[in-house]
Amino acid sequence: IVNHSKVSDYILGLPRYFVINYHDALLPRYAGMYATSWALLNQEKEHGITWHIATEKIDSGDILKQVSFSVSENETVLTLNLKCFEAAKESFSPLIDELATNQYRPISQDIHKRTYYGLYQKPTHNGWLNWHDSAENIERLFRALNFGDYPNALSTLKISFEAQIYLVEKLRFSTRASHKPAGTLVNITSDELHVATPTGKVIMSRFKTIQGHYCDVQTVVKKHQLQKGMKLFSPEPSLQVKFQTLSTELSRYEPFWIKDLSSLEPAT
């Protein structure tokens, strides 16, 4: 259950019957990692969980039990993960009963319906805010990357003011047209920034520095002298592709460097 490393063939061969794995999607679709985030990005209306037999090929063994449920319009990856946990918990006891009484019925996966998302696969332009995208897509990206206080190694929604990067912690959108060019800061209130997109406005109300410190809107406004009518930074398409490519390539080394750098001690 929530095992982030591939189980060896030796371990798979140890049990008398088989190894069982929990997966947070309705296999054969969304095999791999971060299934709930990808489901939100793909605008799925239904999601679920699967208990299946673990085999040499990741998330491809026979299905023992599945539970499906609807995806809410305002679902975040945090709330969708919680739905998966609850469904897994409720279906675990019946699964054990079926195994104990030899009433389980394995179902082979249809390989032609399989979709797979790798551990190092990243969302479009690795979470950088693209003001030329629709307000709906930006808000959906925010929800798909909002893990709450849980560890997030997939990506984060990012914005830059004067070359200083912030993570967007609170965001909503309005379909009310602003009639301003994309990326224009159309309004500043005591606790909100309103930014124009081609389909409406994106409204941000809380940020966090890349060092992990929370900051409110007024702190950001004063520090970077933000004014109504300013055009906010949005990476060029070529830069967006570069960010996504680099993050995909480099993220495989991230666990090593986090462990290595966190164990350093200052020299005397």
Image (cartoon, rainbow, N blue to C red):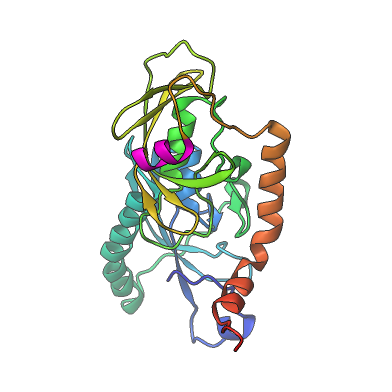
Residue 160 placement, left or right of 209: right
Task: Say left or right for 105 vs 61.
Answer: left
Q: Is residue 147 above or below residue 40?
A: below
**Which quarter of the picture shows residue 191?**
top left
Is residue 12 among the parts visible in the rendering? yes
Taking depth in this image into account, of 166 and 199 the one nearest to the observer is 166
Does residue 185 lie above or below 107 as drawn? Answer: above
* Number of marks drawn: 0
Instruction: Quadrant for residue 60, please give it.
Output: bottom right
Magenta stretch, main secondary structure class: helix
The quadrant of the picture occupied by the C terminus is bottom right
Residue in the image at 46% along x and 33% along y: 225
Give how far across and how far down residue 1 sits, in percent: 42, 71
Q: Is residue 221 magenta?
A: yes
Q: Quadrant of residue 135?
A: top left
> Between residues 237 and 189, which one lies in front from this camera angle?
189
Could you say where residue 266 lies in the image, as x and y percent from the top left?
57, 83
x and y percent of residue 168 in the render?
43, 43
Residue 20 drawn at (x, y percent): 46, 73
The answer to whether residue 33 is above or below residue 225 is below
Residue at x 50% of width, y 21% of height: 184
Residue nearest the observer in this picture, 260 or 199: 260
50 sits left or right of 163 in the view: left
Instruction: Name the residue located 41 percent from the left edge and 13 percent from the top edge.
Output: 177
Range drawn in magenta:
218-224
- Residue 21 is a magenta residue: no
Residue 26 visible to an observer of this rendering? no
